[in-house]
Image (tube, grey):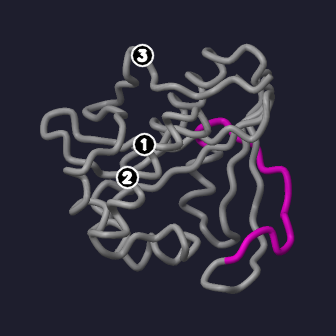
Amino acid sequence: MTQALHLPDPPILLSGFHLRPWATTDVPALVAAWRDPELARWMPEETLPFDEEQARAFIDEAATHLSTGKSIALAIADASTDQAVGSATLHVWGPRHWNIGYWIDADQRGHGLATEAVTKLSRWAFATNPSLARLSLYTLPGNEPSQKVAERAGFRQEGLLRQWAEVNGQPLDWVMFSLIREDL
């Protein structure tokens, strides 16, 4: 039986930031972040909210998935202002296999925030689900900053998944990383 995801309790705290559910007050932050050309070039086009309506749809979908236990999409928010500056998401793929994804605003990149968020959320996942055997993480070839985050968070590169998914209507290869319980 697949364990449903739920919000971390207590919430996951980061250095000067915390993970929390997305809220309607995050619409402007989502629109601004996902209009960043560097972020957009690594994201599947169907997941990119470029306007307020798409950002609201993303937030509503995140709430629906949380209520069903299929995934938790968490905003990485500044601890003092609660301003969203990134995202960390877990998806249930099966009883023993979950997937993790993340992104960070341009202003926060290069400071270790993504690595800290991925590391702590990964450890929380393993701690709360004894049957979880593996977390997967995917990046596009060439997305070296994201690949470095994965490696610093303890993930190991496993290989190249040829034409794994589409980005902007083009089938592309994806680099696969994993973290298993024994890696902790």
Name the residue that disc number 1 marks.
63
- Mark 3 or mark 1: name the one nearer the start of the chain: 3
Q: Residue furthest bottom?
A: 169
Residue 183's spot in the image, x, y percent?
A: 75, 26
* Mark 3 residue type: Asp
CA gap, disc 1 and disc 2: 6 Å
Report the quarter where the C terminus lies: top right
Q: Which residues are magenta?
A: 152-166
Q: Amino acid at mark 2?
A: Ile
Which residue shows up at 46% across the image and 37% down it?
117
Left or right for 175, reference 154: right
Position above or below: 114 against 169 = above
Identify the residue shown where x is 49% and y is 34%: 67
Q: Is 157 within the magenta?
A: yes
Identify the secondary structure beneath mark 1.
Answer: helix
The mark total stands at 3
Residue 170: x %, y % from top left: 71, 85
Pair 3/1: label in front: 1
In this view, the residue in front, 74 or 123, is: 74
The residue closer to the viewer here, 36 or 114, is 36
Could you tell me which residue is drawn at 57 percent across and 40 percent down?
Answer: 71
Q: For marks 2 and 3, give the one nearer the viewer.
A: 2
Mark 1 and 2 residues: CB-CB less than 8 Å, in contact? yes
Question: Which image quadrant is residue 138 in?
Answer: bottom right
Point out the tag, 2 or 3, that comes first from the N-terminus. Answer: 3
- The residue to which callout 2 is attached is 59
Q: Is residue 82 magenta?
A: no
Decide: few, some or many residues near mark 3? Use Cα within 10 Å; few <14, some 14-19, many ≥20: few
For the residue marked with disc 1, what is the amino acid?
Answer: Ala
Q: Secondary structure at mark 3?
A: loop
Rendered position, 146 above or below 80: below
